[in-house]
Amino acid sequence: MARFTLPTARLDAALFAGWRAPLRRSLIATLDLAFPPDCGFCRAAIDSSKLGLLCTTCRQELLAGPAACPRCGRASSALFHEESCSRCAGLRYPFVRTLRLAAYEGAMRAAVLRAKRSGERELTMALGELLAEQAAPTLAPWQPHAVLAVPMHWTRRVRRGVNSPQILTRALAAKLGVPVADHVLVRRRRTAPQASLSTRERAQNVRGAFQARRHRDLQGARLVLVDDVMTTGATVKEAAKSLRRAGAEAIHVVVLARAEELD
């Protein structure tokens, strides 16, 4: 399969790629002397050359929570063969696994909601750095070809003024050293907000909402699909189905948080 090549991927690689890390640390240390940085979440002063974009306390609070099922991402203490939990065993998904940083509660819920606002780009970048740091070690051996975000309808993007999943995607893609491939999946229609809908209504709401553009690079592609929060999984399932129909071989889902209140 041919490699994706996108300007955004090359730009992000310049900011995050490992071989530039010494230069980046030196530059950050110099800037820290003149402009002491703040934690992206609590705004406390930090040494970003050592801690990244979050303070130690916030990192611990954001990552707190029980272990999750590697397949559906729900909190679980009953894993079967370390591949699935009692709630997803036997179910068919259009993706291989789900990686989540935490449950959608407490500090992580507050961070996800704040990141949806246009004035919180620093927080979103901090969350992207944390997501990349935590997810890359698991994803790298799988050798994904590209990373892409669950697309947002353009009207919602204009109203919000920010697309936080795209920012998360760029950080993760740069950490993995692979391109961003947001050009291959589009949102065909505007859907109602999922938050107020039941499980069945959520699935109906997003049915047929995505379309993957057929492209020779999608044939046999191993892709990472990124979103900020996953509740019932209806949205990522529908997006992954579109990618599979267009030729993708396998998809891993990566989210900041997984909600537990709906089955």
Image (spheres, helix red, strand yellow):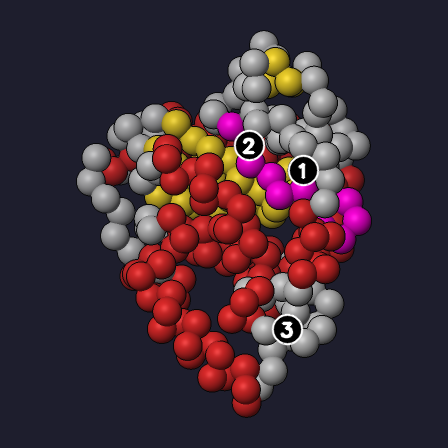
Secondary structure beneath label 3 = loop
Mark before the other along the chain sequence, 2 or 3: 3
Q: Is residue 232 above or below residue 190?
A: above
Residue holding disc 2: 98
Secondary structure beneath label 2 = strand
**Residue 54: mark:** none
Secondary structure beneath label 1 = strand
Name which quarter of the figure residue 22 lies in.
bottom left
> Residue 17 in the image: x percent, y percent?
35, 60
Q: Which residue is pictured at 28% across the width and 28% down the height?
A: 220
In the rendered structure, are the residues bearing label 1 and label 3 in contact, judged by CB atoms less than 8 Å apart? no
Q: Is residue 52 above or below residue 225?
A: below
* Picture quarter with the N terminus: top left
Please say whether residue 77 is visible from this viewpoint.
yes
Mark before the other along the chain sequence, 2 or 1: 2
Q: Which residue is pictured at 67% across the width and 61% down the height?
A: 56
> Residue 48 in the image: x percent, y percent?
56, 71
Q: CA distance from mark 1 to mark 3?
A: 28 Å
Residues drawn in magenta? 97-108
Residue holding disc 1: 258
Q: Amino acid at mark 2?
A: Thr
Which is more foreground, mark 2 or mark 3? 3
Q: CA distance from mark 2 to mark 3?
A: 31 Å
> Residue 111 in the image: x percent, y percent?
70, 56
Residue that extends furthest to the bottom in the rendered view of this protein: 34
Q: Amino acid at mark 3?
A: Ile
Name which quarter of the figure residue 41 lies in.
bottom right
Q: Amino acid at mark 1?
A: Arg
Residue holding disc 3: 46
In the rendered structure, are the residues bearing label 2 and label 1 in contact, judged by CB atoms less than 8 Å apart? yes
Q: Residues within 10 Å of mark 3 (few under 14, many from 20)?
A: some
